[in-house]
Each structure stands twice: as structure tokens, then as C-alpha cells.
Image (tube, rainbow, N blue to C red):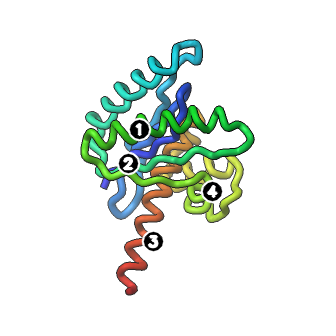
Amino acid sequence: MRILGIDPGTVNLGYGVVDIEEEMHMVDCGVLNASPQVPIQERLRSIYTRLSEILVQHQPDEVAIEEPFIGLNVHSAFAIGRAQAIAILAAANRGLPVYYYSPAQVKQQVTNYGRSDKYQMQEMVRMLLELPQVPQPSDAADALAVAICHIQQSRLNQWLADKS
């Protein structure tokens, strides 16, 4: 099974592709960058086009997307929500199932601690995927963490289903 993890953003959208057989391994990761000086509609169009190309190239079976954290900066949360909607649309247009995880869920599944810091998350991504170094930039590592979260949650759901 192949999972595409997405860390949404309208300036930097991280993506990470992880294969799972017996073990997890990274296929690809990166960041789709867009200048904040470009109008939002153009950034969203570019993200959609480039994300669609990634979907065609890597042929994931499922897509996992991190939900925006709504803290004090509501404007930022709305922008992230727009990028999330574009990612959902790109996946839906390919008929792919989409799963959503909060930042705390991602941290909990990847590090076993829902309040992990960025360094702990990145280091666990490196260890779980047996990479020589932490994936860069950090948005790519975050997207890989979303994919890992989905894999871990799917394993847990399957284990629970088998037990009942």
C-alpha cells in the first residue's frame, strides 16, 4: 500500500509518499512552494496542478492530510484550510480515499506523545523510515509524519477489528 501524506499550506505544501509492506519506507518527499506575493487563486491553481502531477507520478492508494491547527492566528488557519481543500479536490478527482488527522493525532501516532516538539517528530520520522538524516525541508518531514500517522492508525484499526 502507498500513502501520500500532505502538510497543507498556501506558500509551502509538504508532501511525503510512503510505501508499506511489512516495513515502511519513503518513496519521495518534497515541498510545493509558491510566492506569497502571488495572488491566492494563482497559488491554489499551481498547488492543484503540481499535486495532481504527484498523484499521477506516485499512484498512492490513500491520501492523509493534516488538519489546520486553529490557534490565535485564524487568518493562517483559513489559508491552510484552502490548501487542504485543494488537496482534497486533487485526491477526489482521482477517486482516492482521504483521511484527516489533527496535529496532536499525528504527534501521538508518530512519537507516542501528543505534545512532541518539531525536533522529536522529525527524528522519529527519520528513525521509522530508516533514513540517514531528517528529511528537509521541515514541511516534507511533516508530510511524511502524516503518512506514518495514517499507517499507524490503520494498523491499530485493523488490529481492533481483528480482535472483535
Q: SS at mark 2? A: strand
Residue 117: image x %, image y %?
71, 50
Residue 124: image x %, image y %?
59, 54
What amino acid does circle 1 point to? Ala
1 vs 2, front mark? 1
Q: Earlier in the sequence, mark 3 or mark 1?
A: 1
| Residues marked 1 and 2 touching at CB (< 8 Å) | yes
| Residues marked 1 and 4 touching at CB (< 8 Å) | no
Asked whether 131 or 139 is in front, the reply is: 139
Q: CA distance from mark 1 to mark 4?
A: 20 Å
Residue at (67%, 37%) from the top-left corner? Answer: 74
What amino acid does circle 2 point to? Val
Residue 144: image x %, image y %?
49, 46
Picture layout, residue 33 above or below residue 83: above
| Residues marked 2 and 4 touching at CB (< 8 Å) | no
- Identify the residue under disc 3: 156
- Identify the residue under disc 2: 63
3 vs 1, front mark? 1
| Location of the C terminus (image quadrant) | bottom left
Q: CA distance from mark 3 to mark 1?
A: 25 Å
Q: CA distance from mark 1 to mark 2?
A: 9 Å
4 vs 3, front mark? 4
Q: Residues within 10 Å of mark 1 (few under 14, many from 20)?
A: many
Seen in the image, is 48 located left or right of residue 130?
left
Picture layout, residue 54 above or below residue 41: below
- Identify the residue under disc 4: 104
Residue at (36%, 57%) from the top-left corner? Answer: 20
What amino acid does circle 3 point to? Leu
- Identify the residue under disc 1: 87
